Image (cartoon, coloured by chain):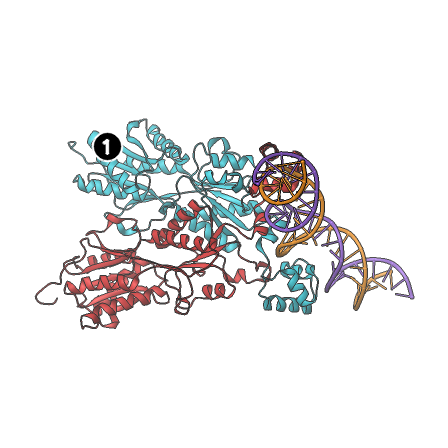
Chain colours: A red, B cyan, C orange, D purple
Amino acid sequence: MANMGDVAKDAGVSKSTVSNVFSGKRSISEAVRQRVLESANRLNYRPNYFARSMVTKETRIIGLVMDSRKVKFNQYNLSFINGVLRECSSQGYRLLIDTLPSSFRNKVTQMTSEPVDGEIILDPLTVDERVEERVKSGRLMTIIGKPPRKYEAALPYVNNDNVQAAETATSYLLELGHRNILMINAVKKHTVSQDRKAGFMLSYSKRGLSPDEELIVYRDDAVSSAEFGYRTVMKWMEKFPDITAVIADTDQIALGVYRAAMELGLSIPDDLSVIAFNNDTVYPGEFHPPLTSVELNGEILGQEAAKLLIEQLVAKNKLVKQVTIQSRLVLRASCGPIKQGFPV
Amino acid sequence: MANMGDVAKDAGVSKSTVSNVFSGKRSISEAVRQRVLESANRLNYRPNYFARSMVTKETRIIGLVMDSRKVKFNQYNLSFINGVLRECSSQGYRLLIDTLPSSFRNKVTQMTSEPVDGEIILDPLTVDERVEERVKSGRLMTIIGKPPRKYEAALPYVNNDNVQAAETATSYLLELGHRNILMINAVKKHTVSQDRKAGFMLSYSKRGLSPDEELIVYRDDAVSSAEFGYRTVMKWMEKFPDITAVIADTDQIALGVYRAAMELGLSIPDDLSVIAFNNDTVYPGEFHPPLTSVELNGEILGQEAAKLLIEQLVAKNKLVKQVTIQSRLVLRASCGPIKQGFPV
DNA sequence: GGGATTTACAAAACCAGTTTAATATGGAAT
DNA sequence: ATTCCATATTAAACTGGTTTTGTAAATCCC
């Protein structure tokens, strides 16, 4: 592979001239420019990515960091990624998926700086060592979701207003007369579950009510979403037969809820109302009856996160900015007023 | 940020000693090793990724190249990615998503070598400039799917046996007595559509039959999958009311087919049999009746592709290897024998 | 028309690592 | 005691770019 020196020699100019042709930083006469480009083309030369990055200290690569224990994107992550990707592509950044297990990364021989200008963190936890580590070494990042509380004021992030979202969903059901609402929440260690719980509680307390906290269930990430939704409803309905509504963490959970309802002979929405938080549904028309849901706009979140990060990268005077995307409740046909008359 | 020289000075050793501590290439006495590591830790030092890569000529990054016109992964791609990711993670490679539009990449000031050791190409086209370009500059790659014909013998790839898969699906329907089968094929310019067509035709011709070629429809990638499936069935059933079976490119297409069937008052499988090619279904239980499908194992394909690429990267004596993953027809409840008696 | 500024290019220093060649030390083998 | 060899360490060269500094020629300004 030809290098800059080879091209310089071939074109009969100095290395710095070739450099300036390719970086465009200093002016070069058109005649020389053409001669250099011609030589470069003949020698099939392109500037070495690393040599350049090493001295400019800029990689034009953004890292995407996910929970290091799982190495698998789900539907939920996919929407973020697509948003991030769109922004990266339009601003000329590449996206590096960071999945190396920390066991690997901590081996002395593997220990290196990360080849990125900044990173986007997915699925923040209430105590998150990925964040700790990056704060400590002063690396730039943006979080999708709410950061661990101790960094909430210090880090840029994009998030839905999850308290609000949960409150809206809960209030809708309360207004329909439901009182025993099963809340299938996100995984407990994820920050989002705290906000959802808060919104849920808030909605009750604003009406002078208080929910049975046993009806707040946290997802177990070892079980598949649909399966967890199914099992939870089957189990809880047995213990609390007066449940008349379910709020599900995702539409995939809701899928399991639907299946359980069918199996229990419960009609949706007559016997059971269902709402789900969701990103961009894959199969929007696949629920019968269509699923009432809180639209979370994952793709927008991803795009805004990338935008925010890149803004930080190019800014000289850093400032911590946080973006909130409002979600909205989309009414379809899976919720109805509570049945009057005798309980089942 | 501290560099190797700083650490060397702090630990009272030479730069090359520090280098060897971190690379593990030459032996260092335990006492010195500890001293260096301590200094490094105190100075919060880690070796610079680029400086190292520049001289070792190894990045331990794999590129994932998708169709540059679309900057969006679909469900179908997600399964590949997860497979690739799994392999990368276990072998210590990072994954770089390459989405920069060629308009960007071809600007002189943006022209650089790619910071990867090798690449995985998604959705190969019958004429594919991404492949051309990489072959010309001698870059290592592995393709998921069948390469353009002219490179079929020259490039490593992993693929399903798509001729076989299509033949199996078609034969199953022909054996059930169906003769007018609507084939909703992949996008025409994708190589996979050619193989699917071949298998479809082959199945007919083996029985001395020949299909109405008007019943082979190619997907339009401008329309969403489910929507395309829906529209196509609505349109074709009007023109060819004697269609009794549909083979769909993906399960998402099948979703649209189901919807169309419902709208037309056709019962599945009594009036219409449906088969889909699919990767890892997100909602396996979501079809009523459950969808008979050709399981394509996207995740395995992705993993094998990464394995194949990494194998190439570390091998001294290059050889072109191609991997075929057999798919299998999973019978569920969406196909049945053709109805006897009067046509509708 | 003479000084100031701009333009076009080159030489050398620099970025942060690795690799090579050279040297010192200690132990085993002859 | 001398040779041989393995181990441990270093100085210097090298990777392939960019940036700084320097300088000659061209253009600008009054």
Can residue A233 be seen here? yes
Q: Quadrant location of the C terminus of chain A?
A: bottom left
Image-quadrant location for residue A23: top right
Quick one: label 1, few (<14), some, or many (20+) residues within 10 Å?
some
Q: Nearer the viewer, residue B2 or A219?
A: B2
**Quarter of the image containing the N terminus of chain A?**
top right
Q: From the viewer's perspective, is B340 left or right of A42?
A: left
| Camera-side residue of B92 and B146 | B92
Q: Residue at left 26%, top 48%?
A: B290
Image x and y of residue A5, in percent: 66, 40
Q: Position of residue B1 (x, y in %)?
A: 58, 61
The three-letter code of the residue at mark 1 reads Trp
**Residue A12 spot, x, y in % from top left:** 67, 34
Residue picked out by circle 1 = B236
Q: Can residue B335 be spotted in the picture? A: no
Left or right side of A202 for B195: right
Image location (x, y in percent) of residue A59:
52, 51
